[in-house]
Image (cartoon, grey):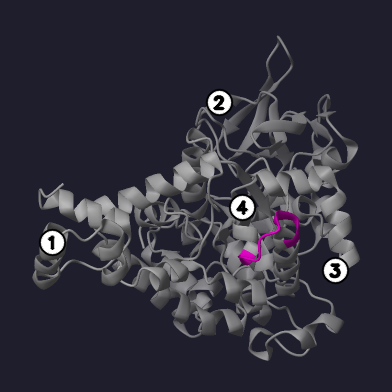
Amino acid sequence: MKQTDALALLKTGASIFLTGEPGSGKTHTVNRYIRTLREHGVAVAYTASTGIAATHGNGITIHAWSGIGVNQSLSRRDLDRIKANRRVAGRIEKTQVLIIDEISMLPAYALDLVDQVCRHVRENPAPFGGLQLVLVGDFFQLPPVVRRERSDQYFLGDMESDSGPIFAYGSSAWRDLSPAICYLSEQHRQSDRDFVELLAAIRANRCNGAFRERLQQRMAPREALPADCTRLFTHNASVDEINARALDRLEGKPHSFAMVSKGPEAFVRTLQRGCLSPERLVLKLGAVVMFTKNDPKGRYVNGTLGEIVDFEPEHGYPVVRARDGRQIVAEPAKWKIEENGKERASLTQLPLRLAWAMTVHKSQGMSLDAAVIDLSRAFEYGQGYVALSRLRGLSGLHLLGLNDRALQVHGAAVEKDEEFRQLSKMAAKALTAAEPEALALRQETFLGSAREAEAPAGGSFAELRETHAKAYMPWSKQEEAELVRRYQGGDTVRSIAESFGRKPGAIRSRLKKLELM
């Protein structure tokens, strides 16, 4: 499915699972939809399963947004307590569209808890209390961490074993929601055919033979590794040690930049946990750095690498020479949490971090031209796939080590992938078959009703099809003739819509096209 098709479906108010390979434009599509919602005055909440992902959209974790915290179950008393918390309940009541990013890392039980809270607070028995849900992510990436005692409550087919991770699509909430699947098929990060084929082989759990040889060819001895290239590791200890040691080796005066925070302490802590820039950033001339945020002016993106070549005299801000030779003054940037369009808390810091090394987990969402990657200690499904898919091409890969787990993705994700692809094709086909006028009317109705809070904002694609069986089906000549006969015979639009299995708006649009209205 193309991004434009997914966006068109999102605008109908149907709940969506937006997925696709790394670089397919999931974040770009979500950001476009958020802009549309805000232009129409629709209250949208951007959340994510992790703090790092949440900062990409000025949001907070879904755990904090919903009030579920670290709980693995909720009693009626717990639900009443959350409802009595006016800040949490207030944002749930005001929200019409809820976005949950990095859904692959959210356990099934957590999605169920969010569903329970939304229904209880909004006093609406519909899935998630009638909200439109936009679930974003790729189940081939890092899976959730689930405690052993939870595993027997969910489908065995969604687990590695009796104690393995449980994906969100195995939850009761997902089944009740029945989201339409938008599987983005365009590739905007990688154009190297050999590399695309390699990543596809890992995604299918078939990275062997010639594909394994391609990776072996990128193995490099330590003494031949590029000195200014970011290294990705699977463990935090390696990262912190390498960055500290590399900075100490540089001569020259250290320049320190302190983070400035504003807002309630709890929100500030949430932002700090998710922000890739440190509270105290120490830089020297020659330091290898990475931008940690997308620049609104387009000068850099999250993941742009460079080297400190100067400090400008007026404010002392560092000057970064990017890999393409451009020199960029790194001015302070803001990370913030918004609720209903209003800023609740913020951090201000230079959008930089030392980048001799970083963890695979923190690299999610980044695009890198080159990296030294050590997967010799990979311990989780999808870890190698996430690391490798950050790169734009195979030529930028300098492989330091590799184990078998690094090339494995979760078997449940492989099994579910074909189903998601087929469901996405069905959604695209239904969208193509829809009458343009009827589709536009549906979009206008949703955006208008969500803005004015006249009707629940959400609703599943499956429910739309069930309520109006032919809502997106093309008109036959026989149906048109029957429509003309009944309308000219005095039948009301509503009665015609009910008998045709279509919406009243679609009937009116067809009558206008036939120049009868």
Q: Is residue 161 positioned above or below 166 on the image?
A: below
Residues shaded magenta? 120-127
Give residue 407's mark.
none
- On the image, the x and y values in percent for residue 356 come to 71, 47
Q: What's the amino acid at mark 1? A: Gly
Residue picked out by circle 3:
74
- On the image, the x and y values in percent for residue 332 come to 70, 25
Residue picked out by circle 2:
327
Give neighbour class at mark 1: few <14, some 14-19, many 20+ (Cα, 10 Å).
few
Q: Is residue 94 magenta?
A: no
**Mark 4 against mark 1, which lies toward the viewer?**
1
Residue picked out by circle 1:
489
Q: What's the amino acid at mark 4? A: Leu
Give neighbour class at mark 3: few <14, some 14-19, many 20+ (Cα, 10 Å).
some
Q: CA distance from mark 1 to mark 3?
A: 57 Å
Q: Say whether disc 4 or disc 1 marks the residue closer to the N-terminus.
A: 4
Q: What's the amino acid at mark 2? A: Gln
Q: Is residue 122 magenta?
A: yes
Q: What's the amino acid at mark 3? A: Leu
**58 or 452, which lies in front?**
452
Q: Residue at x 77, y 90 (%)?
A: 162
Q: CA distance from mark 1 to mark 2?
A: 73 Å
- On the image, the x and y values in percent for residue 95 come to 64, 46
Residue picked out by circle 4:
98
